[in-house]
Image: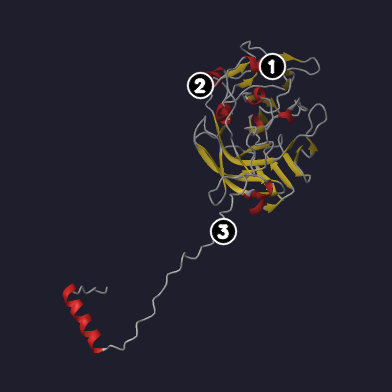
């Protein structure tokens, strides 16, 4: 750092006179003229942030654009309905309307469904069957009623004690009826208007993350191409999915899985979660397989478009949503639309379930 020397005024004046006397012919330096104004600095305009491609309002269980939708319909609660899926129960009624469907392993390896309706609630639905102890944990984050025909008393008591709202045929709740077109117990149906009239639940929170546009989904950009998903749960349950260029079409035992109006069931996203199954005690009733999800975590797959990736999943508790993450720890980004979640046992059953994606 330079130190500036301060010269006393008197000494400076004397020095100036001496210089003037000794050098009378010294030319004065030309005066410098400051410019009238400093040169202007040109600055480029700050670019506007890109427009957010996500819709302002979406259906919470599908992520589909809901702009202009009726406010009363947007406020619909989620109806979680137990649907039978044995060979004797197919074809079901209005299952294609469900926003989200969970497939679970029950006795003898037969599968049963938890179909969740909110954005497109049909007038009637079926076939409705009994509940299992894991159902409250599977659908608890959707915050609406669990609707079923009946169950072992201890399972109903545990579900109600947990705070889960239920609508049950066996206790005389409204909305259930039998059809003469089928033999019991495969002939129980429900009228959704009656179910809606019995609940004060509000619209559910969003459950999954979605990509807008879907081409930017981390499943699509980082996944492996696939056209078939083959699942073997048992000799009674072997669902599969085929990509048709637009959606995943569902099959049962190699045949198209259609509902009673011949519409083939489909999904925009197929999520496979490998889960542990434990048998309940036989105290107070017969032992049944229970899919363990609350407070658990595991691995699986997510298929979006014609691509799939390996994922991790977790669910903190009964009323917490499933969290799906990539290998990098990012939220899995699904395609806006319908989602089927296959809960495939990895332990606790003797059928050696498998998942093959190709």
Q: Secondary structure at mark 2?
A: loop
Q: Is residue 120 left or right of 158 when viewed as pictured?
A: right
For marks 2 and 1 on the same chain, the one whose residue lies earlier in the sequence: 2
Q: Mark 2 or mark 1, which is nearer to you?
A: 1
Q: Mark 3 or mark 1, which is nearer to you?
A: 3
Give the spatial CA distance, label 2 vs label 1. 23 Å
Residue 135 in sight: yes
Q: Is residue 13 left or right of 135 when viewed as pictured?
A: left
Q: Residue at x 59, y 35 (%)?
A: 207
- Residue 267's disc is none
- Residue occupied by mark 3: 44
Q: Secondary structure at mark 3?
A: loop
- Residue 193's disc is 1
Seen from the viewer's position, the closer of residues 223 and 290 is: 223
Tell me residue 98's x, y (percent): 70, 29
- Residue occupied by mark 2: 163
Instruction: Classify 10 Å Cα crowding around label 1: few (below 14), some (14-19), many (20 and above).
Output: some
Give the spatial CA distance, label 3 vs label 1. 60 Å
């Amino acid at each position: 750092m330079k130190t500036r020397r301060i010269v006393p005024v008197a000494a400076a004046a004397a020095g100036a006179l001496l210089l003037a006397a000794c050098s009378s012919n010294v030319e004065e330096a030309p005066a410098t003229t400051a410019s009238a104004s400093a040169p202007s600095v040109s600055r480029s305009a700050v670019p506007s942030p890109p427009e957010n491609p996500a819709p302002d309002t979406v259906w919470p269980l599908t992520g589909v654009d809901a702009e202009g939708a009726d406010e009363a319909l947007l406020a619909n609660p989620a109806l979680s309905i137990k649907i039978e899926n044995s060979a004797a129960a197919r074809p079901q009624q209005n299952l294609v309307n469900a926003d989200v469907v969970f497939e679970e392993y029950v006795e003898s390896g037969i599968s049963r469904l938890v179909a969740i309706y909110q954005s497109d609630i049909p007038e009637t639905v079926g076939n409705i069957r009994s509940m299992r102890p894991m159902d409250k944990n599977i659908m608890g984050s959707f915050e609406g009623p669990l609707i079923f025909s009946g169950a072992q008393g201890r399972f109903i008591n545990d579900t109600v004690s947990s705070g889960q709202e239920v609508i049950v045929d066996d206790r005389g709740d409204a909305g259930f009826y039998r059809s003469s077109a089928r033999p019991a117990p495969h002939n129980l149906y429900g009228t959704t208007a009656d179910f809606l009239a019995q609940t004060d639940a509000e619209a559910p929170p969003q459950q999954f993350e979605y990509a807008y546009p879907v081409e930017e989904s981390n499943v699509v950009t980082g996944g492996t191409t696939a056209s078939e998903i083959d699942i073997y749960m048992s000799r009674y349950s072997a669902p599969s999915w085929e990509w048709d260029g637009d959606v995943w079409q569902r099959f049962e035992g190699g045949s198209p899985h259609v509902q009673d109006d011949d519409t083939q069931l489909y999904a925009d996203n197929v999520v496979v979660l490998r889960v542990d199954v434990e048998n309940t005690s036989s105290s107070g009733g017969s032992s049944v397989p229970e899919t363990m999800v609350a407070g658990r975590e595991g691995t699986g797959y997510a298929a979006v478009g014609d691509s799939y990736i390996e994922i991790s999943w977790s669910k903190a508790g009964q009323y917490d949503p499933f969290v799906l993450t990539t290998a990098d720890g990012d939220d899995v980004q699904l395609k806006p639309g319908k989602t089927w979640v296959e809960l495939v046992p990895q332990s606790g059953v003797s059928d050696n379930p498998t998942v093959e994606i190709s």
